[in-house]
Amino acid sequence: MPTLAPYKASEDVYVLPSYLRVPDVAVPGFGLLVVNSYLIKGREPILIDTGMPIVKEEFLETLWSLIDPQDLNWILLTHDDGDHTGALIEVLEAAPQARVVTQFVGMARLETAHHLPVDRFEIRNPGDTLTISGRELAVLRPPLFDSPATSAYFDVKSGVLFSADSFGAIIPELAENVGDVPKSAYDEGFSIFNRLNHPWFHLVDQGKFEESIERVRRLQPTAIGSCHSPLATGTQVETHLKALAALPAQGALDLPDQAALEGILAQMQVNGD
């Protein structure tokens, strides 16, 4: 479950990736789920999410190789899930100037695991705008979400939409860009992940769902930076929006049961993993 070398999403936006091996729900086997955090460099640097607990030390080593902790000003949380808040306490301790941006319910949910100083929080809800040293970030709820505290952030300067878990995918091999993954494999992994991670999706009104996708389209993002997928850039952005709109018609996934788990364990033994 290692971290990977950081790479650039744009001139001043860095991707801090790690990954997990996960069972492929559709067929016996395994795929990879990337877990991305992002760092926006500038006069007031911004960290988006803080990685998984299981790679905390590696994440911090990578982060502090890119920025002095004394210079970090902002931590934007896409939501409070553990794979997005793994090193939050350590980052706050090392970066005394940093403030945490989340929704009020996100702050409340974090209190179930941590005792965080309330005066280091900045509450921003979907529909708000956060302006940092002249850099404007729009806060919105992405079309799909798995926490009541989920926020996506659109960075006007870079054009990157940091979309939390929405637009994620299980992929067969590591890649920095969606275009580097075979299309059929990516399409399948996109469908599986988004249907599995957001189980309410098939209950939505199609028209209202497409309205939420259109709100993203109107932002005209140049890239989608999902926390669980390689970067989608250029024409891939529109392809992703259309793929998301097509999900409700695909219906709910049949969830893996105990027999599926036993099959996974058997395959792990065969593979010696």
Image (cartoon, helix red, strand yellow):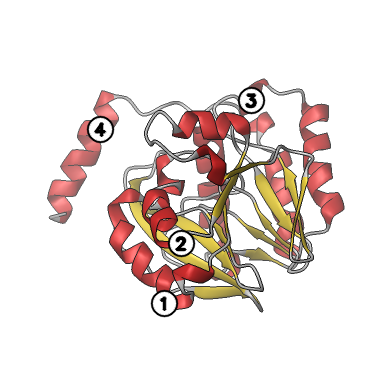
The residue carrying pointer 1 sits among few (fewer than 14), some (14 to 19) or many (20 or more) residues within 10 Å by Cα, namely few
User: For the point 12% across and 55% down, which residue is it?
Assistant: 272
Distance of label 4 from label 2 (alpha carbons): 42 Å
Question: Identity of the amino acid at label 4?
Answer: Leu
Q: Is residue 162 left or right of residue 238?
A: left
58 or 9: which is nearer to us? 58
Question: Identity of the amino acid at label 1?
Answer: Ser
181 or 60: which is nearer to us? 60
Residue 202: which numbered mark, if any? 3
Nearest-to-viewer mark from 1 and 3:
1
User: For the point 51% across and 42% down, which residue is it?
Assistant: 193
Query: Horizontal and vertical percent for residue 82?
Result: 40, 41
Distance of label 1 from label 2 (alpha carbons): 14 Å
Query: Horizontal and vertical percent for residue 45?
Result: 60, 67
Query: Horizontal and vertical percent for residue 102?
Result: 60, 41
Which element is circle 4 on? helix
Q: Name the N-terminal-most of marks 4 and 2.
A: 2
Nearest-to-viewer mark from 4 and 2:
2
209 w.r.t. 95: above or below: above
Q: Picture quarter containing residue 125?
A: top right
